[in-house]
Amino acid sequence: MEREHQNVSLNVPLIQNSGQDEVIVHDVEQNKSSGIRERTELIEEVIKQLWLAGPLISVSLLNYSLQIISIMFVGHLGELALSGASMATSFASVTGFSLLMGMASALDTLCGQSYGAKQHRMLGIQMQRAMFVLMIVSIPLAVMWANTKSILILFGQDHEIATAAGNYAQLMVPSIFAYGLLQCLNRFLQTQNLVFPMVLFSGVTSLLHILLCWLMVFKSGLGGSGAAVANSISYWLNVVMLTLYVRFSPSCSKTWTGFSKEALQNIPQFLMLAIPSAVMVCFEMWSFELMVLLSGLLPNPKLETSVLSICLNTSGAVWMIPFGLSGAISTRISNELGAGHPKVARLAVVVVLGLTLILAVSVGTVMILIRNVWGYAYSNEVEVVKYVAIMMPILAISSFLEALQSVLSGVARGCGWQKIGAYVNLGSYYLVGIPAAVVFAFVLHIGGKGLWLGIICAVFVQSISLSIITIRTNWEQEAKKATDRVYDSVIIPDSRVS
């Protein structure tokens, strides 16, 4: 009996378990599962954004390449043809393309939030509404392009160059209508995460554009003007291919239900986002063009203008990377806010900022490493190459800040903050950046470096302002605003034509 008692006592723990131990174990397991869930959500968000950003970067580069390919072909015809085509392209970008791209970006908010709220039919309505408005806006722009020669001469440009630019711009008139439609189609597909068709059709268009430019410039007898015709054909080709995809693809069966009279209603609601969106984009793009004009007033203007043009081309190509991330975060934010998921929207912002910092540091490091050889890609003159080498570290800092402000601008579009973004860009570039550039370049006599330092000041103020707005955001309130915006735009269906 005594031995049995000892065996029993040995099996009894020295310290009796209490209910608290079970609670502690449960809490630990809950914390572990919560941590695993958070890591899983983080990884999933990274994958979603990279899955969107990669194709969008490709689309941006491919669409950007159309103008570059045209200029390259025209460059083989002589200095006058190249100057005319370059001036016409710059004029078209400032007066037309930037405005239409800005207005179409209102669909980042409207289509993205409608898709998140599962109001799929409204995506097609919003796209038709945007197309209608952009086609109307394109008419006065087309008239302006048709009179490019007179406008350039009025502003004191060389008569020969103005004539060549005027002829080139007149033949680009059909492309402005195609460009507006293309921007709407791209936003319509992007907000549904249908980005791979955009890559495919942009790639096909770019390849065919090379052949078209060769035929039009060298074989048709049109010369430099043939490149402008090739531009118009290529833009319309891309529009036709995307239109056929939207019309016949099962992926768009819920979002495209045919033409509807609803597109002609609620136009003021669209304009309330489209106009600030256009202002937001134009203020930024116009300031860079103004830098080129100011460089012509510096001592040794040929060198300063050449180097600044190289810097702008380099910056433009590098900017396509954060621009892809900007499109991705705009889509993710608008989708999640429309779906009523404020926590996921907030996580998306954290993820995109992390990805942007990694990419921006990597790209900036590469730019610094290649600073001594990059100039040779554009010129064989030692003076130009050395000046570019001096500018590249400044350009690296600028590109880092531009990457940050680009994705924050994407957050703004996803939330519908275009009006705030317009005010931020106005203050950043025209109250800080351009005055600072003038002081650095002409008062402190730093030259072209001073102009770019002014841009850095503008982008720094822009990034800080948008960061503060983003940090102070109440995401629950933004989700409610998104829901209200989506359902305010819903109209009882009427007759439609498929």
Image: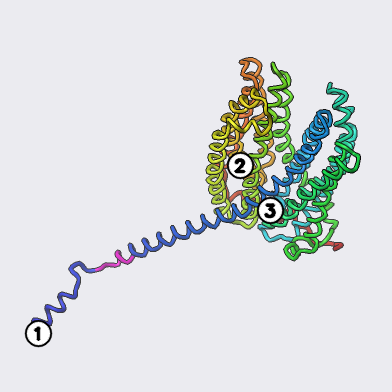
Q: Earlier in the sequence, mark 1 or mark 2?
A: 1
Q: Quadrant of the C terminus?
A: bottom right
Nearer to us: label 1 or label 2: 2
What residue type is disc 3 on? Answer: Gly
Q: Secondary structure at mark 3?
A: helix
Q: Earlier in the sequence, mark 1 or mark 3?
A: 1
Q: Are marks 1 and 3 in contact (CB under 8 Å)?
A: no
What residue type is disc 2 on? Answer: Leu
**Image position, residue 62 (x, y; %):** 72, 47
Residue at 66% over, 47% down: 57
> 236 left or right of 422?
right
Residue labelled with disc 2: 408
Q: Quadrant of the N terminus?
A: bottom left
Nearer to us: label 1 or label 3: 3
* Magenta-colored span: 17-22
Residue at 73% over, 30% down: 289
Residue labelled with disc 3: 112
Check residue 1 in the rendering and tell me which mark sits there, or answer none: 1
Residue at 66% over, 29% down: 429
**Image position, residue 14 (x, y; %):** 17, 68
Q: Residues within 10 Å of mark 2 (few under 14, many from 20)?
A: many
